[in-house]
Amino acid sequence: APESELPAYLAASAPRVRDAYRFALANAQALETVPCYCGCGSMGHTNNLDCFLQNDSKEGGAPIFDQHAAGCGICVDIAQDVKRMTAEG
């Protein structure tokens, strides 16, 4: 997903955070099958995708970003691992 599709609050974020959000936006199906281990289940998150996008946007609507992953290195690490493993096949 292009940088222009990301929310403005990510402009000051580290490149790896923006990259994780772009990956989540373009590869939702890959992240929704992977659990997150940061403790965000108490926030209602059921998978790593929930850390980046809210449920409403998964059904084909406009993306509604979740700010959680912008401040959580564990969520970003998981997304980066999935990105790497997806590239490796």
Image (cartoon, grey):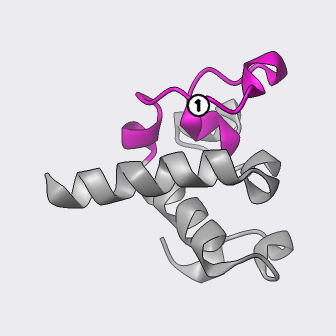
As drawn, is 43 to the left or to the right of 83? right
Percent position (x, y) of residue 3? 59, 80
Q: Residue at x 38, y 48 (%)?
A: 82
Where's residue 63, x and y in %?
65, 52
Give me the residue at 68% from left, 70% from top: 6
Q: Is residue 44 something one can see in this rendering?
A: yes
Neighbourhood count class around disc 1 (C-alpha, 10 Å): few under 14, some 14–19, many 20 upward: many
Residue 46 is situated, as x and y percent measured from the top left of the image, at 61, 20
**Which of 63 and 74 lies nearest the eye of the viewer?**
74
Residue nearer the viewer, 74 or 31: 74
Q: How many marks?
A: 1
Magenta stretch: includes residue 47:
yes
Q: Nearer the viewer, residue 41 or 29?
A: 41
Q: Residue at position x 51%, y 46% from top?
A: 78
Task: State the residue at coordinates (69%, 24%).
Answer: 45
- Identify the residue position indicated by label 1 in the image: 36
**Image-based side of 61 in relation to 71, left or right:** left
Q: Position of residue 14 (x, y in %)?
A: 70, 78
Figure check: 57 above or below 76: above
Vertical arrangement, residue 11 with respect to residue 74, above or below? below
Where disc 1 sits, the SS reads: loop
Please say whether residue 62 is visible from this viewpoint. Answer: no
Q: Which residues are magenta?
A: 28-52
* Magenta-colored stretch includes residue 33: yes
Quadrant in which residue 21 is drawn: bottom right
| Residue 30 drawn above or below residue 18 | above
* Amino acid of disc 1: Cys
